Image (cartoon, helix red, strand yellow):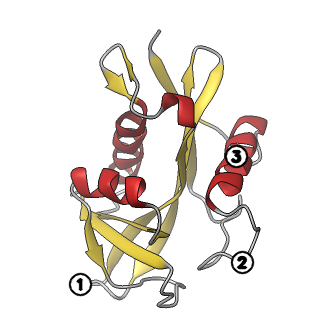
Amino acid sequence: MALVVKAVSWDHPDPSRLRASQGQEINPTGLDEAGVIPTAADIAVFLVVYLGSNAVACGGLRHLVDVTEEICMDVAEIKRMFVIPEARGQSYQGQYTGEFLLRALSKEAKERGWLVLKLETGTTMTRARRFYERHGFTECSAFGTYDTSTASVFYRKLIA
């Protein structure tokens, strides 16, 4: 079976379910997270990856005009990228779920003329951090509305 990516609304049941699973996995205590919590109003595109009829991954892009860049530019912040545990590291017809989703998000950003991808992740999210680093992301300073929380790590990647 092949992976398929679809753009869906933020409030669609599939991404809502995936985001709830992500929240339980990375923050079971429900404590406040860093930065401004994303909403349907500020997510430009939200993608869901399907394996057959099953939603197995999701991720969105929030548009930022980032003045922390050397040249002020349009930036896409990756939000709520998540792959269900059963699909992590699995190849479906030669496609790995996380890589498939990241390529789709990069393509969406490029089509909008955004030159850089940025993201925030937790210091304890070592698997996610290794994933981003393998795909060309490098650590950067805090951006947007994030503070310099000691529990956050920030990444960027030029995609233009």
Residue reaching furthest to the top? 1
Q: Are marks 1 and 3 in contact (CB under 8 Å)?
A: no
Q: Nearer the viewer, residue 71 or 33?
A: 33
Which residue is at 38% across, 44% downward? Answer: 102
User: Can you say which quadrant of the picture contains the C terminus?
Assistant: bottom left
Please provide percent x and percent y for residue 99: 35, 38
Q: Is residue 128 left or right of residue 151?
A: left
User: In the rendered image, is residue 72 in sight?
Assistant: yes
N-term-proximal mark, 3 vs 2: 3
Which residue is at 71% across, 54% downward? Answer: 24
Query: Are there few (<14), some (14-19), or many (20+) residues within 10 Å of tag 3?
Result: some
Instruction: Inspect the image, locate mark 1, and give the three-letter code of the amino acid beneath it.
Output: Ile
Q: Is residue 20 left or right of residue 141?
A: right
User: Does dot 1 land on a helix, a strand or a loop?
Assistant: loop
Q: Which residue is mark 3?
A: 21
Q: Nearer the viewer, residue 142 or 10?
A: 142
1 vs 3, front mark? 3
Q: CA distance from mark 1 to mark 3?
A: 37 Å
Picture disc at residue 160: none
Query: Are there few (<14), some (14-19), or many (20+) residues within 10 Å of tag 1?
Result: few
Q: Which residue is mark 2?
A: 32
Q: Which residue is mark 1?
A: 71
Instruction: Inspect the image, locate mark 3, and give the three-letter code of the amino acid beneath it.
Output: Ser
Q: How many marks?
A: 3
